[in-house]
Amino acid sequence: MSASPVTSFGIDFGTSNTVVAKAAPDSNGAVEILRLGTPPGERGVHPSVLAFEEAEERGRPVLAAETGDRAIDLASRHPEDFRYVQSFKSYVASHAFDGTHILGRRFEFPDLLSAYLTRAGIARLIRETPGPKRVVVGRPVTFHGDAPDDDLAVSRYRAAFAAAGIPDFDLALEPVGGAFSFFRALRSSVRVLIADLGGGTSDFAVARFSLGDDGVRSALLSHAGVGIAGDRFDFRIVQNALLKHFGAGTGYRNEGKLLPVPKNYYTALSQWHRLTRLRAPRYLDALKDIRRTAEAPAAIDTLIHAIEHNAGLAIARAVSQAKARLTEEETAEVAIDLGAARLRETVARADFEAWIAEDLAQISSVMSRAIDAAGLRETEIDHVFLTGGTSLVPAALGLFVDRFGAGKIRAGERFSAVAEGLALIGRAPDSDLWLAR
């Protein structure tokens, strides 16, 4: 049976980045990574971020939105003028998140994702493509959160895509998309562990592939996931290397008693998207009162400055860049220019690996659960296929090398493999075998 004549789009909407791939009927199996943004950017990897600002259109006030690298640039240079939204995929399955107010307007999750799909140009690229089309959207094995609701997440996806003008799409597991090209190249019957380590989740799937006269037949044996990945590793760097510069662990005097500076200020710095709410007068005024009797007034001044000037993005970018350097180097400097204060902290890879050891142990445990659920022993896994940017972290890669040996490890293009595979699934004659609900 030949492949479908439709043009297929694969959308990998990730916690950190989004990639869209297109497989056209005349592409001979090749896949094109689309440039996203308005106007289109230079990279195929488009950060999953939004930056909102108040603007005017035909004399009326409106909210203008930017996405990707342009949003990051604008929010970095003008933090007080933009409301910046990052990692919002983390809330798609959460009942606790029912919406947020941005510059006076209420946004529910579908509103945020619809704005992103529209402003990033994804809806337009699909709409302007002639002929029959199919869209395959990736979804994690397990959505992020303490009690994620799959049905809620899927309903929010469908509402958001419909609002952006994409009413019809199929879902496929992200790790299956990431390894799809690898599956198609198989020339023997094998059992494969697929690991997709991204920004918000670490997902695993175990599949059996049998080679017959009519091609490769697949059977998904098990899957498991956990909401621990690259964002959590960033959180550990902030916790262990940076919070001391903002007065964490110090105290202040109140009616003769020495009390700790409230932890909610430092939680907001560690999970920086929460920092904006601390600009409310009741939080800032309380912090300024604390500063008067603080053990470390200069550090509290730095904290106040970071909150007043919405410095969360600057902190997050510096941490992410340092983490990336640690994949290649033994040390990396976290450098943050807050204007009133310049912070410098050198992080050693050995320390970083100690900070994330517990997180890696949880990821490893979930991997074991996926293998056990497939009814296999580790020695019965023939190949391990890795995708996702967090799989580049040496300690994360080491999980797989230590358990399976370097000879079994295979990897796709870490940032585009999922989108490419999703697009190819959309054109596969047996596509229904690869889809999720």
Image (cartoon, grey):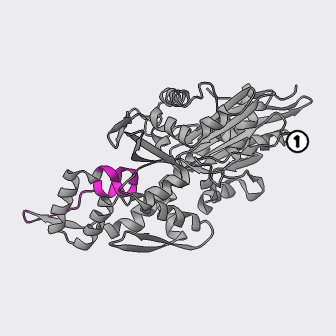
Q: Residue at x 29, y 56 (%)?
A: 265
Q: Residues within 10 Å of mark 1 (few under 14, many from 20)?
A: few
Whether residue 377 is visible to the viewer of this picture, yes or no, is no
Could you tell me which quadrant the N terminus lies in? top right
State the quadrant of the C terminus: top right
Secondary structure under the numbered disc 1 in the rendered image: loop
Q: Amino acid at mark 1?
A: Arg
Residue at point 59% right, 47% down? 37
Is residue 229 in the magenta section?
A: no
x and y, in percent, of residue 268 in the image: 34, 54
Q: Is residue 420 above or below residue 166?
A: below
Judge left or right: residue 323 versus residue 373.
Answer: left
Residue visible at 49% across and 29% down in the picture: 156
Asked whether, in this view, residue 150 is left or right of residue 251, the answer is right
Q: Nearer the viewer, residue 411 or 374?
A: 411
Residue lying at the far left in this picture: please name it: 255
**Magenta stretch, residue numbers:** 255-277
Residue 298: percent from left, percent from top: 25, 73
Give yes or no for residue 268 being in the magenta stretch.
yes
Please state the horizontal and vertical placement of residue 188, each as a whole percent of the image.
87, 41
Q: Nearer the viewer, residue 162 or 367?
A: 162
Residue at the far front: name it: 58
Q: Is residue 342 visible?
A: yes
Taking the image as shown, residue 224 lies to the left or right of residue 269, namely right
Residue occupying image coordinates x 46% and y 38%: 112
Q: State the residue position of label 1.
A: 187
Across and down, in percent, residue 213 comes to 92, 30
Q: Quadrant of residue 145?
A: top left
